[in-house]
Amino acid sequence: MTFVEFIITYYPRFLSGTIVTIEQFVLASVLCIFLALLAGLMKLSPRTSVRACATVYIEIFRGTSLLVQLYWIFFVLPLFGITLDKFTAGFVAVGLNVGAYGAELVRGGVLSVPTGQWEAAVSINMSPGKRMSRIILPQALVNMLPAWGNLLIELLKGTALVATIAVADLTFEARQINYSTFMSAQSFGTALIIYYVLARFLLTPLMRRLEKIMARQIGRE
Amino acid sequence: MSEDMTQFPLRLEGENAPMVRFMNVSKSYGELTVLDQLNLDVAPGEMMTIIGPSGSGKTTVLRMLMTLETINKGVIYVDGEPLTHMEKNGVLVPANKMHLRRMRAKIGMCFQHFNLFPHMTALQNCMEGPVQVLGLTKESARQRAEELLEMVAMSDKRDHHPSRLSGGQQQRVAIARALAMRPKVMLFDEVTSALDPEVINEVTGVIRKLVGEHHLTMMMVTHQMGFARDISDRVCFFYGGKIEEQGAPADLFGSPKKQRTKQFLSAVKEAV
């Protein structure tokens, strides 16, 4: 079987795997961004108890292996009565894990906004919530976007682990095709290329564009 | 160390009540005393200028009024009411957040480094407070902002972001932004110190206009002695966290009484 024949035969499975990978990526990203914002802002709270909650989350999910976290969520949580289907367990684990890294980006981004901006917001008597949402976060976001580009690429690659709990993503399909054809180089080679194309030609340009738009909004052309 | 709070009145009333009063205010960072038992009154409509060497506590005075710094002792009053404290069962206790927010509405401030919001145009900078804080409609906030930008001669640049404005232009927008909140007291913290010499007059011109046309209480920290002399009703010379000498500008600059004032003024003169 030539490589062309291989692709013609198996492209539907690579395609469906890629779609599942993209779905996992999108859902995990949404969860990740939400958790990163929440934990990042909590980490800046004046209340020790709030900060402590965020620290516990960040330490657990950043300090242990993503694969083990995935197994915990899929295999151990049911023992405590929380059962997630494998698709949900997959993106939840990845989102929780990468969100812990993102929290540090959010915290760093907020701290990178000059104190003068806080003081100006106080001087026009803004409430703490509006200070954050209208003055600080928009500027923090611009500062942290480049780092988020990297993190989301990590997240995309991290979704490959969901194959280990039999979510039929790109990695899972490549492995299945390899089992039935023993064409390892072709199976995993194709998967590799697809991951690269997703990261390099879809995600990176998207983030660059976003950086440009945000930079323009802040008047830094 | 606890303080006897009964020595402080709950309100300042009567015809001669000052707009701003510092009463036995002290501030220290650990061992370092920044302000030492400061007593200072500013009358309604007065333009009061603070001069002095760096580290003498001048900027701290303004930052305390804007509630950007807390105080360790004493009470600050604004417009008859305590700013740093509030009444509870007939005595003054430290102010809570709600009280601070209510009182802050009386005060506006301009900073050395302008601190405009970089993600907003000049116009949006001036509308932000009125819309988000005062709850004005967009139209009336826009009208107010446009009038103020007109006053500071920045109408033609109203749709520019701060990054496209010069320092002098940014500072004029910052003044408009503060005025848009209709404060009773305006604070100017070294507003010309970060500017190139040739644009300083743009900003001092706006402040002169304010002094001439509005009955606004103003406090200013500056290194522009000539400007201070021209427009102030009163000048305070700060030294080591205390008022070393104060008086009408003609007296303080013309015939300073204290040795330290003389030294400072002659040192400043030499620098120019």
Image (cartoon, grey):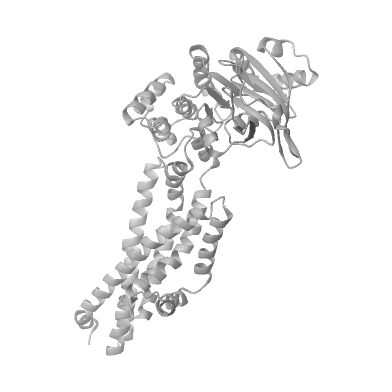
Quarter-of-image position of residue B129 = top left
Residue B223 in percent (x, y) is at 63, 24
Q: What is the quadrant of residue B236 in the picture?
A: top right
Q: Name the foreground residue: B46 vs B155.
A: B46
The residue drawn where x is 38% and y is 47% is: A214
Residue most toward the right?
B259
Q: In percent of the image, x 46 and y 60: which residue is there?
A: A102
Q: Decide if residue B117 is on the left or right side of residue A204.
A: right
Q: Nearer the viewer, residue B141 or A196?
A: B141
Q: Residue furthest front?
A: B89
Check the image and report above or below for B191 versus A47: above
Seen at 39% across and 76% down, the residue is A161
Q: Determine whether A103 is above or below A130 in the image.
A: below
Residue A10 locus on image (x, y percent) = 22, 81
Q: Give the percent coordinates (x, y) of residue B109.
A: 53, 28
The one nearer the camera, B20 or A70, is B20
Quarter occupied by residue B150: top left
| Residue A42 % position (x, y) | 50, 55
Could you say which is closer to the camera, residue B121 or residue A187?
A: B121
Q: Left of B206 or right of it: where is B121?
A: left
